[in-house]
Image: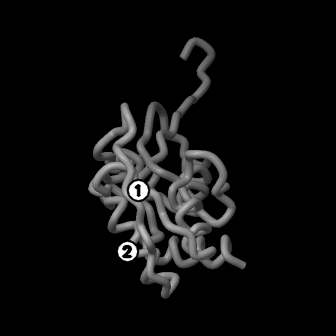
């Protein structure tokens, strides 16, 4: 404020897409896509009812572009679909996308894991006319196809 610099911060939901790494702990969509494509079992921690807000990477890019072109955007903005999808529902949607049946291994819940997460992006809609455009089925179709070439 002292120097008149406009700043804005973006908080992302669980971003996924074709170039997401399936290595490590992060990126359940990429991990599940690769494992399902290879015919390996999918590990679900807890009962599979934990929910996340899955946001396709192209929608993130769109938000960043819109924000950079906005003259009024200041402060903090959530980017998400606002839709809670359980881990089990994610598995079911990936089965539909891939045409494969997933073998699921349930493991104990991980300590400190958030049970439910979804972001309200209404402020981004009001300020720079952004909302997620890519539905989960379409985003998973693209991601699964690219990660299993």
Q: Residue drawn at (48%, 64%), measured in percent from left and top?
A: 42
Residue at the extreme right: 149
Quadrant where the C terminus sits is bottom right
**Residue 23 in the image, given as x and y percentages of width and height:** 66, 52
Q: How far apart are marks 1 and 2 (CA)?
A: 13 Å
Viewer-proximal residue among 53 and 148:
148
Label placed on residue 81: none
> In the picture provided, is 47 more to the left or to the right than 70?
left
**Residue 127 in the image, given as x and y percentages of width and height:** 41, 47
Residue 41 vertical placement versus 67 (above, below): below
Residue at the extreme top: 2
Q: Residues within 10 Å of mark 2 (few under 14, many from 20)?
A: some
Q: In terms of secondary structure, where does tag 1 sit?
A: strand
Quadrant where the N terminus sits is top right
Q: Residue drawn at (61%, 24%), measured in percent from left and top?
A: 5
Q: Residue drawn at (63%, 74%), measured in percent from left and top?
A: 38
Q: Are marks 1 and 2 in contact (CB under 8 Å)?
A: no
> In the picture provided, is 76 more to the left or to the right than 17?
left
Q: Residues within 10 Å of mark 1 (few under 14, many from 20)?
A: many
Label placed on residue 92: 2
Residue 142 vertical placement versus 31 (above, below): below
The residue tagged 1 is: 44
Residue 92 vertical placement versus 45 (above, below): below
**Residue 105 in the image, given as x and y percentages of width and height:** 41, 61
Q: In terms of secondary structure, where does tag 2 sit?
A: helix
**Residue 46 in the image, given as x and y percentages of width and height:** 32, 49
């Amino acid at each position: 404020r002292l120097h008149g610099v406009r700043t804005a911060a973006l908080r992302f939901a669980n971003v996924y897409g074709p170039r997401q790494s399936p290595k490590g702990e992060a990126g359940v969509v990429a991990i599940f896509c690769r494992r399902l494509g290879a015919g390996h079992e999918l590990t679900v921690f807890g009962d599979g009812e934990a929910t996340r807000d899955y946001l396709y990477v192209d929608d993130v890019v769109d938000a960043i572009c819109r924000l950079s072109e906005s003259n009024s955007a200041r402060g903090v903005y959530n980017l998400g679909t606002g839709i809670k999808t359980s881990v089990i529902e994610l598995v079911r949607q990936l089965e539909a996308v891939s045409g494969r049946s997933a073998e699921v291994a349930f493991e104990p819940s991980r300590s400190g894991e958030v049970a439910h997460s979804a972001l309200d992006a209404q402020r981004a809609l009001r300020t720079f006319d952004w909302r997620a455009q890519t539905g989960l089925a379409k985003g998973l179709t693209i991601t699964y196809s690219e990660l299993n070439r």
